[in-house]
Image (cartoon, helix red, strand yellow):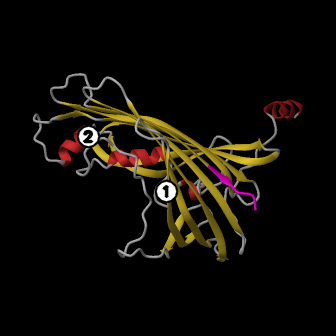
Amino acid sequence: MLTAALIALAAGPTVEPVELVRTFTQGESYTYEVRSFLQLETKEYPLAYYLPSLVDLNYDFTAKVNKVRPSGFAEIYYERPEMIQIDGETAERGPLTTKEKIDWKINLVLSPINEIIEMEDLTPKKDDGGTTPLFFNSVETAAPQGGGMDIIGEIQRLALFIGSLDSAIDFSPKLPFDEVEPGDTWERTASYQPQKTRSGKTEVQRLDYVFTFDGVKDWKGIKIYQITSKLELDSDAAPWLNRLMRVPEGRETLMKMPLKLEAKIIYRLDMETKRTLSAFAESNGGWEMFMRGDGLKATVSQKIKGRTTLKEKAK
């Protein structure tokens, strides 16, 4: 027994499994600020250098818990009054700041694992009958649009961690279904991208974030739970695009289109309520197009870097 006790002592204290389930309180309200930065560097043949394009997208949002259901699900009123876009300076002008009043007002139901299961858009209609969309005016793909080429725009949005409300950083991280210990992982789908299957054929498949529970950490003088999520994409979209465009085999003009993206997000959660206190995200990637006759030279190349922070604002 003494030997067993010594072995247990050497192994360190026992870590109890943690149930990462968010708890809500009726009437509580939280305001967050989201600050995002995206850098694109694009080179088109025959240019020998990359042209940079910089953009910041910033916004604040408020989430108020109107009701907590017996199941633990929360009925939340979400508001995002405006978005501020800052386009980086160019040779012709200095930085350009555009403020757009989007006036998002949304009723939603949020589960204890941060999944949006219901959504009602209450955003005031514009004169044309529509609602103001999330704008992305200055982020140009340098690739032709349509016919599946919007995959580039999706990669850029993933790099910036901003998209539709159910996939943006606003209600993250997506929590696990089961209890976890430090080092445990789980997955959630972030997007869909052309990727090679086990059979060797390229098809549009799930692109997942892999979440890892890091355990208890010290942060700004308090104990918090930390979760790290990572996403990796490394594929060639050309076979899928050629098949989509019904290009006969052997007559392809698009020979290769490598897509790459690595993204990492660190979340810090309140240990009692499992509410996200802050998040820091970084991404790095890019894409290229190689056409028949261009040899080893890419017709278009683009490097992508992104950075986003989410922080709860003091009341």
Label 1 sits on residue: 167
Q: Quadrant of the C terminus?
A: bottom right
Residue 101: image x %, image y %?
A: 51, 65
Quarter assignment of residue 272: bottom right
Q: CA distance from mark 1 to mark 2?
A: 27 Å
Q: Tell which of 137 and 218 is nearer to you.
A: 137
Identity of the residue furthest to the right in this view: 2
Question: Magenta stretch?
Answer: 310-315
Quarter assignment of residue 4: top right
Residue 266: image x %, image y %?
A: 62, 43
Which element carries disc 1, helix, strand or loop?
loop
Residue 155 shown left or right of residue 237 in the figure:
right
Q: Amino acid at mark 1?
A: Ser
Residue 232: image x %, image y %?
A: 46, 38
Label 2 sits on residue: 201
Identity of the residue furthest to the front in this view: 92
Q: Amino acid at mark 2?
A: Lys
Residue 174 shown left or right of residue 89 in the figure:
right
Residue 87 shown left or right of residue 30 in the figure:
left
